[in-house]
Amino acid sequence: MAYQAGGQRPVPRPVPDTSDVQGYLEDYAGLLEAVSFPSLVVDHCWDVVLTNSAFRSLFGGVGPYPTAMPGDNFLRFVLFHPDAPTVLGEHEASWCLPMLAHFARTVESHGPDHGLQAIRRDIAQDPIMEAAYRHGLPHWIRSVGESAVEQDGAVRPLLHPDPRWGATDCRIVAETSRTLEELGCTRLTFVLRDTRRTPSRDRRTRRTASHLRVVPVAD
């Protein structure tokens, strides 16, 4: 996976600045804070609108990175941040590929969009990630099935910094209320599962490789 992609991250798309919307989001932030599991609200570009303290605790140990912090844009974090594998278990197969495939579908459905195209340009800056995007993803989807692209209900491994959780799994629950839908936003909650797994290998090592090993690349 490539981490040099980027430059300056585009400014997140603001939500409509009306008193009703701002009041709703303030109250929704209170709702998120009452949830014990990591939860965030993102727009269709994965720009982060809201997070709760459980989400911030989960990713609190990642280092600074100019274009891909988890509280700014979660897709960029998954794809580009070198510390992402220290929190996201089985990073490439369980997180990168499904989210890259979901992004590809979003690009197709939304058409021209400044935020999406900015991420697409960053992917194109790395030849191997670009090859994976163009050629590897169709092969991967055929291998694992169309359902692997869906967010809601997906079970993915996490490496939680809290030793009470440690190496565990989370089920992603995607929800959108009428108001969030009108804003183009979705709420994602990582429902932690008490698996108490012992990693068979040290998966907390900071990644330095710049490729997707699990995706065959066309010649």
Image (tube, rainbow, N blue to C red):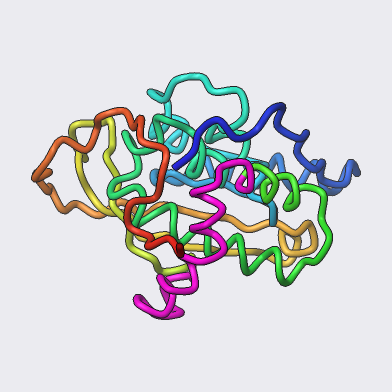
Coordinates of residue 136 in the picture (x, y in percent): 46, 65
Coordinates of residue 117 in the picture (x, y in percent): 75, 51
Front-most of residues 173 and 44:
44
Front-most of residues 116 and 162:
116
Whether residue 11 is in magenta: the answer is: no
| Residue 52 vertical position relative to residue 7 in the rendered view, above or below | below
Res 86 → quadrant: top left
Residue range of the region highlighted in magenta in the rendering: 123-150
In the displayed image of the protein, which residue is found farthest to the right? 18
Coordinates of residue 5 in the picture (x, y in percent): 60, 35
Give the residue drawn at x 70%, y 32%.
9
- Please name the predominant secondary structure of the magenta segment in the image: helix
Left or right: where does residue 101 sit relative to residue 38?
Answer: right
In the displayed image of the protein, which residue is found farthest to the top? 64
Coordinates of residue 120 in the picture (x, y in percent): 68, 51
Res 219 → quadrant: bottom left
| Residue 15 vertical position relative to residue 99 in the rendered view, above or below | above
Give the residue drawn at x 70%, y 63%.
107
Quarter in which the N terminus is drawn:
top left
Left or right: where does residue 2 sit relative to residue 125?
Answer: left
Left or right: where does residue 127 sit relative to residue 94?
Answer: right
Give the residue drawn at x 91%, y 44%.
18
In the displayed image of the protein, which residue is found farthest to the front? 219
Whether residue 137 is in magenta: the answer is: yes
Give the residue drawn at x 25%, y 54%.
193
| Residue 171 vertical position relative to residue 129 in the rendered view, above or below | below
